[in-house]
Image: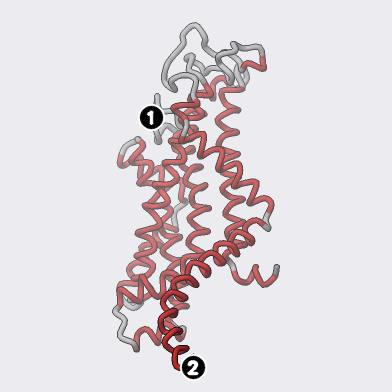
Amino acid sequence: MAADKLPSERAAQGPLAASESAPAARGSGWGELWRGFAANRGAVAGLVVFTGVVLAALGADVLAPHSPIEQYRDAMLVPPSWGGGAGHFWLGTDEIGRDMLSRLLHGARLSLGIGLVSVLLSMVPGVVLGLLAAFFPRRLGVVILRTMDVVLALPSLLLAIAVVAVLGPGLVNTVLAIALVSMPSYVRLVRASATVELGKDYVVASRMAGAGRLRLMFDTVLPNCMAPVIVTATLGFSDAILTAAALGFLGLGAQPPMPEWGTMLASARDYIERANWVVTLPGLAILCTVLSINLMGDGLRDALDPRLKRAL
């Protein structure tokens, strides 16, 4: 009797066991990813700093003591409170009396938003075009790759300046320009990774099992190409922030009175010797944010690259 019940019990417990093992496998995968990431102390430090910047950006409306665009004409170029300035302007004021702390907090939201939207607008079309170039290499792939070669032949910053000059300065056009110049890296990366995956046995088995082309592209091949894409997107995030700051410094990005860090640097460049905090503080904000993102990208690369895992 007991022997007869064992197969039925196993059959009854099979789906439950499978459903319980899947979360455990996912949990162990996330745990392994975190262990690989945490082994890089610089990446952990970058994560801490970046988390602080994100929290400051999300809570800017609550944390900012003043409006980022309100002008105090009787308190222009007031130094920070530790430098002998007024106590209610902790980081001082700029050349027209706006609170620096409030502008930095709101500028974090603006700069991070530009970076995030630019990465998404470049990564999603880039991944799709890269898959198309890998699955249709003879005609469509040639057209896509040659177009990307033309974009890559031009310096990214100069191309972004040209795009904004044609479309007109502004926040939306800045995001579009950054997305355009960042797209070729995703296209070429996904195309190269997908081309390697197409020759592997699991893809051949999926084709023989009758999987359609869309399923092969997005369900079979793409998940195995995402590790380098995630690392590239992380590093592209910092590049987007730098490019947005450069365009803002040139007067082609976010326009005043928006508290974008590059725009703040541009308006303060005439006061470097007289009031160095109006230049130093936005520059330090850009430096700390970009450095923390780059350190996180290095940690993700170490955690996602199987060759580095074996070396560790």
Label 1: how many Cα within 10 Å (few below 14, some 14–19, many 20+):
some
The coloring applied to the image is secondary structure
The residue type indicated by label 2 comes to Ala
- Which residue bears the numbered disc 1? 255
The residue type indicated by label 1 comes to Gln
Q: Earlier in the sequence, mark 2 or mark 1?
A: 2
Q: Compared to 14, does 100 lie above or below?
A: above
Q: Nearer the viewer, residue 27 or 283?
A: 27
Q: Compared to 103, does 166 lie above or below?
A: below
Quadrant of image for the C terminus: bottom right
The residue at the point 40 percent across, 24 percent down is: 257
- Which residue bears the numbered disc 2? 3
Q: CA distance from mark 2 to mark 1?
A: 78 Å
Mark 2 and mark 1 residues within 8 Å of each other at the beta carbon: no
The residue at the point 52 percent across, 68 percent down is: 24
The residue at the point 57 percent across, 66 percent down is: 28
Q: Compared to 139, does 72 lie above or below?
A: above
